[in-house]
Image (spheres, rainbow, N blue to C red):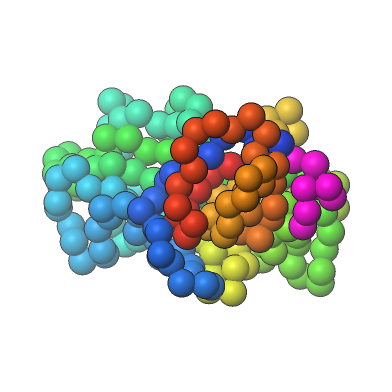
Amino acid sequence: MTVGRRSLILSLVLLIGACAGLAPGFADRGIGGTGISVGDRGIGGTGIVGTVTAFGSVWVNGLRVDLPATAAVRVEGIPAEPSAIRIGHLVAMTAASGGPTGLEARTLEVRYAVAGPVERLDGATAVVLGQRVEAAPGVGRTLLRPGSWVAVSGLRRPDGVIAAGRVDGWDETKGWLLRGRLDAVGPSTLTIAGLTLSRGGLDAAVPPVGSAVRA
């Protein structure tokens, strides 16, 4: 994908994980920043990144986390109600010991791997912003039609394909969104997850190549 073909002006890049130096073909692991493993149940102030698998509190990565009314819930940075969270959403939480489950969320943000128009279908694989997306039946796969705007929650496999846990409709007025590895930095361009973008008016310091970023 080239800037000329895509004509996308990059307005913002945020570092979302300490992922510098990742090898080619890295996959999302479901543990973000100073995250915790499935067996690590009660460390205060930790981050948890994973897919919502059940409710009755929120189950993520096998952990049952209480979601109190005081928790700050956001969807891609926009304040939201807890009712906006759905099974299959990829979420990032900060949590501490407490609550009836022993682990209590302080913040929870729904994050999308990619959001934008479906470019084409290659068999069972959809292409969104140059990203290959595979979705099982029942997670919104019927929304993956050429020309439709979608937001995809999911983790990347080692081959770069996004395994969708959920596909939602997306308002095109919100623009495009992409999370992935920063592959290359040029004087006027950035390449993220294989997609080359114009840096536009971006003056902020750019994270090192290999970092996980959001554009």
Residue 91 relative to residue 72: left or right: right
Label count reads 0
The quarter in which the N terminus is drawn is: bottom right
Q: For residue 36, what is the image quadrant?
A: bottom left
Q: Is 22 on the left or on the right of 76, as rendered?
A: left
Q: Is residue 6 magenta?
A: yes
Residue 163 shown left or right of residue 210 in the figure: right
Q: Nearer the viewer, residue 28 or 7?
A: 7
Name the residue rendered at 59%, 74% in the picture: 159
x, y percentage for residue 75?
A: 50, 34
Q: Is residue 74 above or below residue 46?
A: above
Q: Residue at x 47, y 38 (%)?
A: 205
User: Is residue 24 in sight in this rendering?
Assistant: yes
Whether 120 is drawn above or below 168: the answer is below
Residue 183 percent location from the top left of the image: 57, 59
Q: Residue at x 82, y 63 (%)?
A: 121
Which of 180/69 is in front? 180
Task: For residue 141, say whether it is visible.
Answer: no
On screen, residue 90 versus residue 168, left or right, reads left
On-image quarter of the C terminus: top right
Q: Is residue 75 above or below residue 44?
A: above
Is residue 111 shown above or below 122? above
Asked if the stretch drawn in magenta spans residue 2, the answer is yes
Residue 80 picture location, percent across and down: 47, 27
Measuring from the top left, give residue 24's x and y in whole percent. Answer: 52, 72
Closer to the camera in the image, 87 or 12 = 12
The stretch in magenta equals 1-8
Q: Residue shown at 46%/72% (left/top)?
A: 23
